[in-house]
Image (spheres, coloured by chain):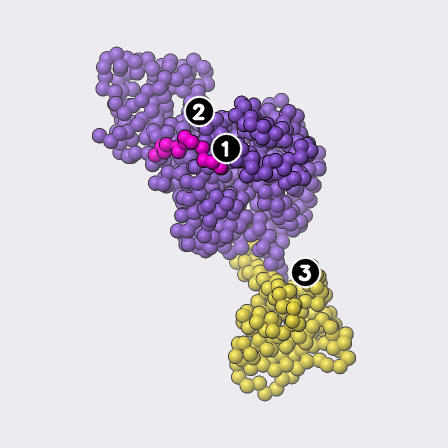
Chain colours: A yellow, B purple
């Protein structure tokens, strides 16, 4: 098993922290191997920033990602930069209000920034995205992700971040359920 | 021989002449039969039929005249309707529909009547005793906590500042009734609790809680009224409840330990329930209401339960339901019958524990308040969390990936007293309404925690002022320009629809009613790519 994940967005959205949480959860909590290549320099201060995370159940020989299996885009610029690299059967995840994917691109979307604003703290959008990512991809386990979020966020903000994580995770599970229900033709309560 | 009790209500016109003929002949009329002469079979209401069972009858037979020979014209037809509806309720309660039978006789068929009576007695013997055992109430000396003085002290009614805000807010006073909560309080403080007009006033209170909402001294008037009703009940001084006390009889009958209601037999096949599930759904009395009112109100409050179950299924919850589910006891508690309320509460608590569920979901605001608050406050804690369906829906819808089709009508919302004021959750239905894209909510001037009552509570104290209140409420709802009045309590729906039946003003009062849960079930869908 090997999963190559690119998380991209504006510098300042917490993209690198999201990548670090995913990698740490895999390596420390789930007992897998993981590597992280993160943006540094001008893009991490407002440009199309990215975190490249590889997760595998065997040794990882090369940490750079040319064709991700999973692309998480939290900005349009990031999406434009990486969309062509996503493998055809790859999973695309976008922030619903900030990214407009190409027609027919498929994938999953979550209004993480809007949810973060509704929760009163815009900067937790990345944690909501980590929750959504965990639910959709199964790349890391729920418990590993939850524990890593708790350990990775500033002291005193754990509960708020965990609430954000749960919000994203619940929305992800709900999205998967919606997709399964629609596929089965069970659209409404009376269908 | 076992001591069976069989009541035969006998119309004084045709059947009694036949019965008298048998008596004159010294015919072998079964000794179990207690004959009661009545003016007409149509006068025996559903309440009287059920009361017979509540008082220990094993079987009841109603004998009227042949169709077309009733001296009152519609007596036979009324008897047929009352009997068939009571039979359906007896069946649902688990007493057995066959324990109540209707027949028609003219004076010239005494031998046929005798054979019929003997056959009925044999049939009752085969069925065995009724599961309802009449229990003698514990009365006599009132407990110290149940004197007017102790009740006044317990609820700190002395804190009343006599400011009159309760009276100016009172739903009944707004309907024009000379009614004043503070005056009732003052008179009871003055030691006049036993005055008939004070008793009547205590009985007439809607316990809607608007006065408590406005009281600057936080005198909990509804709780005070409830305790006073318990005092009157203890001294056998309660006023007659509405509908002949049918629902109170039903609830008292449900306290019988060996009663096995057959509660969920008629669920649509597509609704999924599962024995032993971690979530238990509690339905309440809506199906009984639907049978009782079917002839004149056409209510379908059992749909609320079906739609709630559909919504649970929609969110992949297959709840357990208790086939022997009984009433929560709300109305017994609020009419002062604490003794039978506690019997029901303990019975329910045992059934919930036996189910093994960790969460109980209910769609009725009265059931919710009673189970979540009144049970533990009366010494019957429950081994599970109680959740109102609105709370469940808000929790699930908040997770996302669901959308709503427009309901196709503008709506207004009638708050349920128990939800909006007693539980302080008038925000819950509004959160759900806000999520219902394309459904416009037009609020009435009095809404939320200040909403006016639907006009009645606990099946007691209904009068012309209740009706006036309901008419005002419907008028207020229509003035918002709404096409549908959404309700959140089966009783709100019943009471508002009752006012719409007004023969003189029917056209002015028509407004479609629908429960919010049903509106959600009809519009919700899974969305997302």
Give the CA separation, mark 3 to mark 2: 57 Å
Letter of the chain that mark 2 sits on in the rendering? B
Q: Which mark is residue B10?
A: none
Numbered circle sitting on residue B45: 2
Q: Quadrant of residue A54?
A: bottom right
Q: Earlier in the sequence, mark 1 or mark 2?
A: 2
Circle 1/circle 3 CB separation < 8 Å:
no
Which mark, residue B147? 1
Residues packed near mark 2 inside 10 Å, few (<14), some (14 to 19) or many (20 plus): some
Region rendered in magenta: B133-145
**Chain ID, mark 3:** A
Question: In the figure, A74 relative to B366: above or below?
Answer: below
Measured as percent of width and height from the top left, residue A66 is found at 65, 81
Image location (x, y in percent) of residue B202: 56, 29
Circle 3 sits in a helix, a strand or a loop, which is it?
loop
Vertical side of A72 occupied by B461: above or below: above
Dot 1 falls on a residue whose secondary structure is loop
Is residue B61 left or right of B315 when viewed as pictured? left
Q: Pick whichever, B303 or B341, lies toward us.
A: B341
Q: What subunit carries mark 1?
A: B
User: Which residue does the image show at 51% across and 43% down from the upper left?
Assistant: B374
Q: CA distance from mark 1 to mark 3?
A: 51 Å
* Mark 3, residue position: A119
- Whether residue B137 is in magenta: the answer is yes
Q: Position of residue B208 (x, y in %)?
A: 59, 36
Image quadrant occupied by the N terminus of chain B: top left
In the image, residue A43 lies at what x, y percent? Answer: 75, 78
Total marks drawn?
A: 3
In this rendering, do the residues under marks 1 and 3 share a single chain? no
């Amino acid at each position: 098993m090997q999963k190559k994940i690119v998380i991209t967005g504006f510098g300042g959205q917490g993209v690198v922290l999201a990548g670090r949480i995913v990698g740490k959860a895999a390596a420390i909590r789930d007992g897998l191997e993981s590597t992280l290549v993160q943006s540094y320099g001008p893009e991490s201060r407002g440009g199309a920033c990215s975190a490249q995370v590889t997760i595998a159940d065997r040794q990882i020989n090369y940490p750079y990602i040319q064709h991700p299996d999973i692309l998480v885009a939290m900005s349009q610029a990031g999406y434009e930069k990486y969309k062509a690299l996503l493998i055809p059967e790859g999973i695309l995840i976008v922030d619903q209000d900030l990214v407009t994917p190409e027609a027919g691109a498929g994938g999953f979307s979550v209004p993480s920034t809007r949810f973060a604003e509704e929760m009163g703290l815009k900067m937790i959008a990345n944690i909501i995205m980590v929750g959504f990512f965990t639910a959709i991809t199964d790349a890391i386990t729920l418990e590993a992700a939850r524990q890593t979020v708790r350990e990775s966020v500033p002291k005193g903000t754990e509960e708020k971040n965990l609430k954000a994580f749960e919000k994203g995770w619940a929305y992800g599970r709900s999205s998967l359920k919606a997709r399964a229900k629609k596929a089965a033709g069970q659209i409404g309560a009376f269908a | 021989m076992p001591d069976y009790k069989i009541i035969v209500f006998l119309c004084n016109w045709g059947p009694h002449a036949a019965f008298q003929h048998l008596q004159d002949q010294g015919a072998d009329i079964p000794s179990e039969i207690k004959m009661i002469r009545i003016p007409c079979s149509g006068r025996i209401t559903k309440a009287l039929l059920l009361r017979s069972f509540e008082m220990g009858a094993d079987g009841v037979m109603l004998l009227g005249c042949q169709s077309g020979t009733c001296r009152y014209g519609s007596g036979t037809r009324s008897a047929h309707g009352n009997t068939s509806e009571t039979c359906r309720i007896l069946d649902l309660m688990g007493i057995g529909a066959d324990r109540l039978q209707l027949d028609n006789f003219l004076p010239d068929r005494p031998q046929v009547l005798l054979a019929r009576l003997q056959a009925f007695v044999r049939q009752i013997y085969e069925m065995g005793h009724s599961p309802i055992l009449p229990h003698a109430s514990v009365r006599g000396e009132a407990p110290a906590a149940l004197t007017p003085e102790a009740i006044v002290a317990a609820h700190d009614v002395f804190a009343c500042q006599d400011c009159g805000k309760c009276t100016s807010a009172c739903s009944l006073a707004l309907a024009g009734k000379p009614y004043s909560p503070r005056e009732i309080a003052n008179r009871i403080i003055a030691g006049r609790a036993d005055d008939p007009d004070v008793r009547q006033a205590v009985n007439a209170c809607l316990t809607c809680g608007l006065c408590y909402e406005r009281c600057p001294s936080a005198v909990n008037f509804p709780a005070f009224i409830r305790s006073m009703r318990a005092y009157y009940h203890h001294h056998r001084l309660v006023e007659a409840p509405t509908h002949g006390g049918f629902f109170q009889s039903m609830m008292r009958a449900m306290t019988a330990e060996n009663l096995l209601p057959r509660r969920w037999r008629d669920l649509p096949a597509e609704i999924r329930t599962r024995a032993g599930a971690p979530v238990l759904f509690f339905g309440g009395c809506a199906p009984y209401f639907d049978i009782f009112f079917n002839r004149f109100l056409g209510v379908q409050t059992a749909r609320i339960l079906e739609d709630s179950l559909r919504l649970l299924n929609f969110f992949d919850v297959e709840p357990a339901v208790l086939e022997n589910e009984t009433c929560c006891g709300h109305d017994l508690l609020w009419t002062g019958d604490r003794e039978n309320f506690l019997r029901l509460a303990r019975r329910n608590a045992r059934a919930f524990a036996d189910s093994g569920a960790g969460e109980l979901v209910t769609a009725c605001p009265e059931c919710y308040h009673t189970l979540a608050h009144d049970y533990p406050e009366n010494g019957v804690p429950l081994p599970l969390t109680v959740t109102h369906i609105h709370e469940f829906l808000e929790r699930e819808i908040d997770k996302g990936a669901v959308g709503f089709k427009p309901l196709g009508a503008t709506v207004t919302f009638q708050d349920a007293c128990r939800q909006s004021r007693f539980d302080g959750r008038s925000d819950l239905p509004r959160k759900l309404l806000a999520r219902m894209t394309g459904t416009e909510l037009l609020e009435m001037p009095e809404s939320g925690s200040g909403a006016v009552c639907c006009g009645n509570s606990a099946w007691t104290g209904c009068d012309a002022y209740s009706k006036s209140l309901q008419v005002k409420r419907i008028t207020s709802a229509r003035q918002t320009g709404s096409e549908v009045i959404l309700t959140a309590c089966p009783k709100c729906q019943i009471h508002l629809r009752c006012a719409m039946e007004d023969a003189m003003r029917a056209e002015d009062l028509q407004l479609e009613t629908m429960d919010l849960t049903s509106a959600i079930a009809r519009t919700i869908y899974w969305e997302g790519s």
